[in-house]
Amino acid sequence: MAPQLLRVGAALPDPPFEFVGTQGPAGFDIDLMRRIAGKLGREWQLVPYTGTDFNGIFAGLGNAYDCVASGTTITPGRQAIADFCAPYAVSGQSLVVDRAHHPKVHSTADLKGLVIGVQKGNTSQPVAEKLVAEGRAARVRVYAYDEIEKALDDLSSGGCDAFMKLAPVTHWLVRDRPKLAVVQTGITREILGVCVRKGDAALRQAIDQAQAELVKDGTIPTLIKQWLGEGASAA
């Protein structure tokens, strides 16, 4: 009998958490879930989520996939619709600008009159909306979740003035964009984790046990250092 599949939902591209490289799927969550599946004696399968709003990914739990591992911040709203496993990392929002366009922008304190780009359903969205509500930025431009490359292009063309996203992602994406720079990190403190269908205690506990073993043997700290760098730390 073939091993039971562990279907993992993820929103791509979201490097360095998950992306498709020349050798196929790669990234922190990819490596993590392969190892967790191995601990559970199950085969691993990536199920890409293609919705424009990240929050829609949770609707597929128990149907399209068994769990979500997608650089997912644990929030009260998400905990109401999914059960989260033990956290694996801590990270936070960061700010990216084109230095040539906005040489005086060094943090969220310098955004008055400017437009902040975010992805729909990302935890950066309420942070940016709060800055606008407080009069510290002009407005928020919301991009579909898979339009992150367009958002970064817009920093240089004037479509938006700054872009907000978790630090590991922005550090990864600006590597090949010399005009762009991550000017601020640590805007928020966010705890990340894998989640399962609400009420699936058996799978949640199994993943927790596998994660605990991978923490004890040093695997998860090594993966965090390898993929997420200074933008995150072990939970």
Image: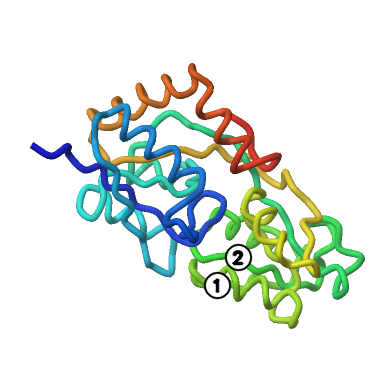
Image quadrant containing the N terminus: top left
SS type, badge 2:
strand
Q: Nearer the viewer, residue 113 or 216?
A: 216
Quarter location, residue 227: top right
Instruction: Residue under label 2, please give it.
Output: 118
Instruction: Residue under label 1, please give it.
Output: 143
Q: Nearer the viewer, residue 227 or 54?
A: 227
Q: Which mark is residue 165?
A: none
What x and y, as percent, mark residue 3? 17, 37
Q: Hey, which residue is sitting farthest front in the picture? A: 23
What x and y, as percent, mark residue 110? 85, 61
Q: Nearer the viewer, residue 102 or 214?
A: 214
Q: Residue at x 43, y 21 (%)?
A: 212
Q: Residue at x 72, y 73 (%)?
A: 115
Q: Is residue 214 above or below residue 184?
A: above
Total count of labels? 2
Q: Is residue 122 above or below residue 210?
A: below
Left or right, 91 with respect to 38, comes to right
Label 1 or label 2, whichever comes before in sequence order: 2
| Disc 1 + disc 2, Cβ < 8 Å | yes
Left or right, 140 with respect to 121, comes to right
Q: Amino acid at mark 2?
A: Val
Q: Hey, which residue is sitting farthest top in the picture? A: 216
SS type, badge 1:
strand
Q: Residues within 10 Å of mark 1 (few under 14, many from 20)?
A: some
